[in-house]
Amino acid sequence: MVSKRIKIKDPTRLKLFCFVIFFITVLLLQSKWLYSSDYQHTKWVVVSQGESLWDIAARYKADREDIRNYIYKIKEINLLKSSMVFEGQELELPVQ
């Protein structure tokens, strides 16, 4: 059996192709790690008047979970940039 050698005509295109494949792989792995957690389900709640994210987190977090970590997860799931919530706002909460 005769094997043929492949000659690379444009090494820049090969580098670009490898970079794109690497970038896509990193994005896929990051999204898997970002959204995987110990939580199997989510629950939707509506923010009441005068309620803060801290109040909501204290009510729904697991018994032994640090409230700051739970607030971080809530912000991550709901794509919140700050801890401010408003009356009538719907939030998705992770629940065990």
Image (tube, grey):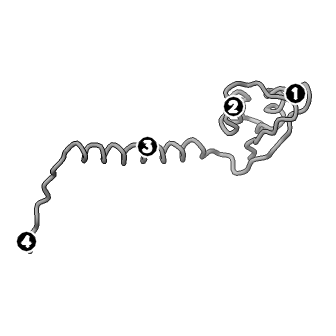
Give the spatial CA distance, label 1 vs label 3: 38 Å
Mark 2 touches mark 3? (CB < 8 Å): no
Q: Which mark is residue 78?
A: none
Label 1 sits on what residue type? Answer: Glu
Q: Which mark is residue 2?
A: 4
Label 2: state its secondary structure. loop
Label 2 sits on what residue type? Answer: Leu
Q: Which mark is residue 26?
A: 3
Numbered disc total: 4
Mark found first going from the N terminus, 1 or 3: 3
Label 1: state its secondary structure. loop
Mark found first going from the N terminus, 4 or 1: 4
Give the spatial CA distance, label 4 vs label 1: 74 Å
Residue tagged 1: 51
Q: Which mark is residue 80?
A: 2
Give the spatial CA distance, label 4 vs label 2: 60 Å
Mark found first going from the N terminus, 4 or 2: 4
Residue 9 spot, x, y in % from top left: 15, 50
Label 4: state its secondary structure. loop
Name the one closer to the observer, 31 or 36: 31
Q: Residues within 10 Å of mark 3 (few under 14, many from 20)?
A: few
Q: Quadrant of residue 31?
A: top right
Question: In the visual, does 92 lie left or right of 11?
Answer: right
Q: Quadrant of residue 34?
A: top right
Name the one closer to the observer, 14 or 42: 14
